[in-house]
Amino acid sequence: MRQYPWLWVGVFVSLALFTLLHLTEWDWFENMTLLFERYDRYELDELFLSGIVLVVFIVIDANRRKRKAEIESEKAAIYKAMLNSTQHVLNNFLNKMQLFKFAAEEVPDFPREVLAKYDQISQEATAQINALNNITHISPEIIADSVAPKSVD
């Protein structure tokens, strides 16, 4: 029942309408036929029917677009929350790695090329985090392109 809520609403409304029309003995369909007959000589009956169908599909399309926009907005919010959390964790990691760099700088025989490589790796990671943070349109391709290895000079 929870899987198809609008189906059940439709069933309920249809049954309620059927019961109401049956109890009041009001023949809605016959009245609609009389209305269409009045405008038949102007050929407006086809226009009314076509207009009703068009309005129904416009409403369906508008609801579909609205729902799609809501889903995209939710995706963006989830992406940003995940990104902020990841950025926090990675920044903490990079800051803690500074302790190892400071310890390595105190060792006289430690290769200076390794320290330079460490700085380069840290800058690349920071640049990639910033690139991810600046994404405005979320798609797998854009995300992959933003973290593609780029050398920081």
Image (tube, rainbow, N blue to C red):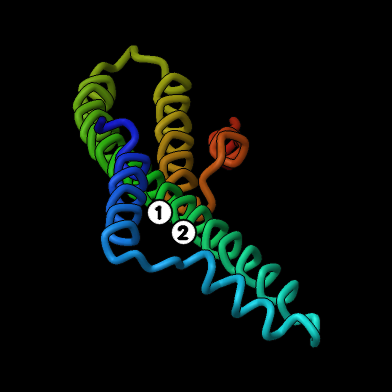
Say above or below: 118 vs 123: above
Residue receiving disc 1: 70
| Disc number placed over residue 66 in the picture, else none | 2
Mark 1, other Cα within 10 Å: few <14 / some 14–19 / many ≥20: few
Q: Are marks 1 and 2 in contact (CB under 8 Å)?
A: yes
User: As rendered, which of 126 and 143 lies closer to the eye?
Assistant: 143
Label 1: element kind: helix
Mark 2, other Cα within 10 Å: few <14 / some 14–19 / many ≥20: few
| Residue shown at 56% from the left, 62% from the top | 56
Say above or below: 30 vs 90: below
Farthest top residue in view: 109
Q: Amino acid at mark 2?
A: Lys
User: As rendered, which of 126 and 20 lies closer to the eye?
Assistant: 20
Farthest front residue in view: 25
- Judged by depth in the image, the label closer to the viewer, 1 or 2, is 2
User: As rendered, which of 148 and 108 lies closer to the eye?
Assistant: 148
The image shows residue 76 at horizontal and vertical percentages of: 40, 48
The image shows residue 45 at horizontal and vertical percentages of: 71, 76
